């Protein structure tokens, strides 16, 4: 089978597609033939060697957490899953950007018929992160909550989950994403002109103040939230790790939402229409370099997905 590997740190050009053996399931695993696998900015950071302090890498290294596909083999101790079952899931072994992958049975939920392969295959990282980041700021009905990078992969889901919880959501993004945010009952806040301009627009949009802030971009949004008077324990960042713990600022992310139960909540909402996860682009596995080159422009609305 084919799988993505990199053998040195660097840009998308270090990614290659190699031939390798089909995985064999451990007793508690199944093998999934991957129909779609989302790509995520954290994978690019790992490949550039930027996260070695947190997630050390052994080269050569595979990549990919998100996946959806059909089960082709079942480990001896697995109950409840059969060959042919269509599933949504994840791995922690950097291995889903491949034609087949061994997956712990506990990391799977059934794929609903109403969810496309592309959406199912990119639901996990953004879904688990959005769920945890939303929970962390404890949104209450009537709260005003601001979100940076509100139309990105994580941001689009955070924005919609906050609306579902009854919050008034101010979604910071580029003008290109304003219409989509409005279609999700989110008030778009233009991010152009720098943080001071964004702060002015937020003050104008919420004259009585902002109750909570979800930072999905870094680069000063946590400080902006503190300056606007948002209490630290109602600010959650998934990227500005230096700010986490200072002033009570929270850092809930994917690890806090990595359960099949949370994945099931997200997938159910994608099936019944409470959540939309736009698919910006799909690429065959052999074009993985181009897929990441597009992702790393940081202009994605929703997800970019590999089709192995
Ligand atoms: N801690 C965790 O567990 C965890 C988990 C997942 C992701 N992450 C991190 O969280 C971040 C977001 O992930 P993602 O998957 O949502 O990324 P993404 O889909 O690539 O998000 C890109 C978004 O960023 C926005 N953006 C670009 N420049 C911006 C700027 N200067 N200010 C504000 N927004 C800007 C863009 O929207 P506009 O053009 O509309 O602004 C775009 O929609 C990444 O850094 C990722 O590594 C952390």
Image (cartoon, rainbow, N blue to C red):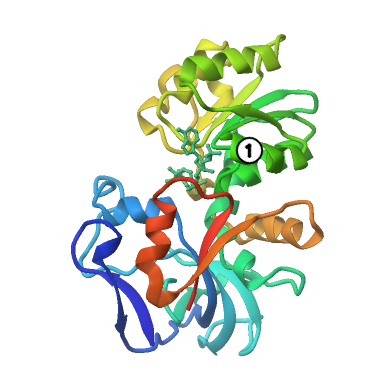
What residue is disc 1 on? 134
Q: x, y percentage for residue 306?
A: 48, 70
Q: x, y percentage for residue 263?
A: 63, 59
Q: x, y percentage for residue 265?
A: 71, 56
Q: Tell me: residue 263, above or below residue 227.
A: below
Residue under the image location 43 percent in, 56 percent down: 294
Q: Residues within 10 Å of mark 1 (few under 14, many from 20)?
A: many
Q: Quadrant of residue 123?
A: bottom right
Tell me if 62 is positioned left or right of 173 in this view.
left
- Location of the N terminus by quadrant is bottom left
Is 1 or 236 nearer to us in this picture?
1
Q: x, y percentage for residue 175?
A: 60, 34
Tell me if 165 is positioned left or right of 258 in this view.
right
> Does residue 233 appear in the picture of this structure?
yes
> Does residue 94 appear in the picture of this structure?
no
Is 158 or 13 nearer to us in this picture?
13
Tell me if 177 is positioned left or right of 16 in this view.
right
| Ligand 1 neighbours mark 1 (CB distance < 8 Å) | no
Residue under the image location 44 percent in, 45 percent down: 298
Q: Secondary structure at mark 1?
A: helix
Q: Tell me: residue 199, above or below residue 107.
A: above
Residue under the image location 59 percent in, 52 percent down: 302
Residue under the image location 45 percent in, 55 percent down: 40
Q: Tell me: residue 37, above or below residue 207.
A: below
């Amino acid at each position: 089978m084919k799988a993505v590997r990199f053998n040195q740190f660097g840009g998308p050009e270090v990614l290659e597609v190699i031939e390798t053996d089909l995985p064999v399931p451990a007793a508690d695993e199944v093998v999934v033939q991957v129909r779609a696998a989302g790509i995520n900015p954290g994978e690019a950071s790992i490949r550039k060697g930027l996260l070695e302090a947190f997630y050390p890498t052994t080269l050569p290294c595979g990549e990919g957490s998100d996946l959806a596909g059909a089960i082709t083999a079942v480990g001896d101790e697995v109950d409840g899953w059969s060959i042919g079952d269509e599933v949504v899931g994840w791995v922690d072994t950097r291995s889903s950007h491949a034609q087949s992958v061994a997956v712990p049975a506990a990391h799977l939920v059934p794929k609903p018929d109403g969810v496309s392969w592309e959406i199912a295959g990119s639901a996990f990282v953004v879904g688990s992160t959005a769920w945890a980041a939303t929970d962390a700021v404890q949104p209450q009905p009537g709260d005003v909550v601001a979100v940076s990078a509100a139309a990105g992969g994580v941001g689009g889901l955070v924005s919609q989950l906050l609306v579902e919880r009854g919050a008034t959501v101010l979604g910071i993004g580029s003008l290109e994403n304003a219409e989509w945010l409005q279609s999700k009952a989110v008030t778009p806040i233009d991010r152009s002109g720098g943080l001071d301009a964004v702060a002015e627009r937020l003050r104008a949009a919420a004259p009585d103040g902002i109750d909570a802030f979800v930072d999905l971009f870094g680069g000063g949004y946590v400080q902006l939230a503190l300056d606007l008077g948002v209490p630290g324990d109602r600010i959650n960042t998934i990227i500005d790790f230096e700010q986490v713990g200072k002033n009570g600022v929270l850092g809930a992310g994917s690890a806090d939402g990595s359960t099949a139960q949370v994945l099931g909540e997200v997938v159910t909402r994608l099936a019944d229409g409470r959540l939309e996860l736009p698919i910006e682009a799909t690429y065959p596995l052999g074009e993985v370099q181009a897929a990441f080159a597009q992702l790393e422009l940081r202009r994605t609305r929703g997800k970019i997905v590999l089709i192995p």
